[in-house]
Amino acid sequence: MNAAVSSSSWSAIETAALRSDRFRLDREADWKRLEAIVTRMEKGRLRGVSDEDLLALPGLYRTVASSLSIARETSLDAATLAYLEALVQRAWFIVYGPRSSLWEWLRGFLGGGWSAAVRAIWLDVVIALAVMVAGTVVGWLLVSHDPEWYFSLVGRGMAGDRVPGASVQELHGTLFGLSKENGMSVFAAQLFSNNAQVAILAFALGFAFGVPSLLLLVQNLAVLGAMAWLYHGAGLTLDFAGWIAVHGTTELFAILLAGAAGLHIGRSLAFPGNRPVLQAAAEAGRRAALVMTGVVLMLVIAALLEGFARQLVDQTFGRLVIGGFMLALWSAYFFAFRGNADSATRVERRR
């Protein structure tokens, strides 16, 4: 009895092995050809791939994927399954994966994709800019009528020595004489952290029809208006403008774009036009995400300017030159530089 069972088991094993070998022999040529093409393309040797192989690539991928499906259903040997799974995965990235490297994407992003996305939401940028100006005016007017509003807007912890009633010398000391400090001052770090959070929240809350995004812009710029009132009263308006301009023309521009990106999503939800709401939101989301990718870059640059340039440049004129140059640079890039339209289109599609 045991001998009969053993003989039957060996017969089944031999039959399965024979079936696996026959399966491999019938299809192995296609597997090897696909593997050779994929290997050359993975190594960047595109010139070594003939036109015939490129045309055959999609068909070979489907053939090998079919082989993998059959191998799973018929429980072929583990080695064949592992080989086919790895090959199909590698081929999928070649056939359906991204067509460009990170460097190529970055070149398209900076070479026209980012600026094109900003121009595409120009109406939202104009609205956000008007709201930011209004927020600055509101902050100024509030503290000019009641100085107690200053602490509600700025906060005692963040204000430090920058408080109503401080002497001209004290306020002047908060703007100059910081070149010997290591890294960013505590106030500068707090200001950057606050603005970065505002930029992220202004974008993230755009889904609520853009209303929270606009309110955040008003609140954040009201802080700036309150501080401008404080330094104006001490006769340090130009010095304060230079102190802010070094990093502010980049940082505030980033907040402007973040608020506009959030508003763009909110407007697409509230006013989708002739498109379905989900389609309108998806299209707006792709453009807004592209803008926000650049906003992150701007915030990093602003942090470097705030941490080093403002501390090292201890003169108002020099600070205004740096701030003015950065403002002109960003404005020219976003609204004058057209770049490569094809690159911009490809970048937005990949998003």
Image (cartoon, rainbow, N blue to C red):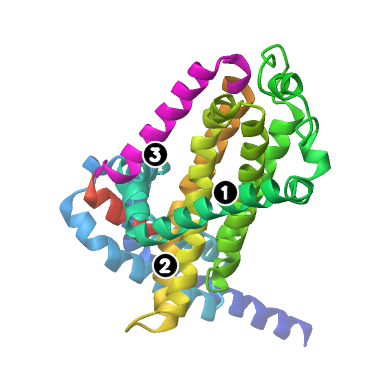
Tell us which disc is closer to us: 2 or 3: 2
Task: Measuring from the top left, give residue 138's x and y in whole percent.
Answer: 60, 54
Q: Which residue is mark 3?
A: 103
The residue positioned 56% from the left and 36% from the top of the image is 300
Ranked by sequence position, the earlier of labels 1 and 2 is 1
Ranked by sequence position, the earlier of labels 2 and 3 is 3
Disc assigned to residue 136 = 1
Dot 3 falls on a residue whose secondary structure is: helix
Q: Does the rendering let one see residue 191?
A: yes
The residue positioned 69% from the left and 16% from the top of the image is 178
Tell me, yes or no, whether the highlighted magenta stretch contains residue 313: yes
Please, which residue is most extreme toward the front here? 145
61 with respect to 341 (left or right): right
Which sits in the foreground, 342 or 71? Answer: 342
Q: Do callouts 1 and 2 mark residues in contact (Cβ within 8 Å)? A: no
Location of residue 177 by image quarter: top right
Tell us which disc is closer to us: 1 or 3: 1
Q: Does the rendering let one see residue 351?
A: no
Q: Which residue is mark 2?
A: 284
Dot 2 falls on a residue whose secondary structure is: helix
Which sits in the foreground, 39 or 274? Answer: 274
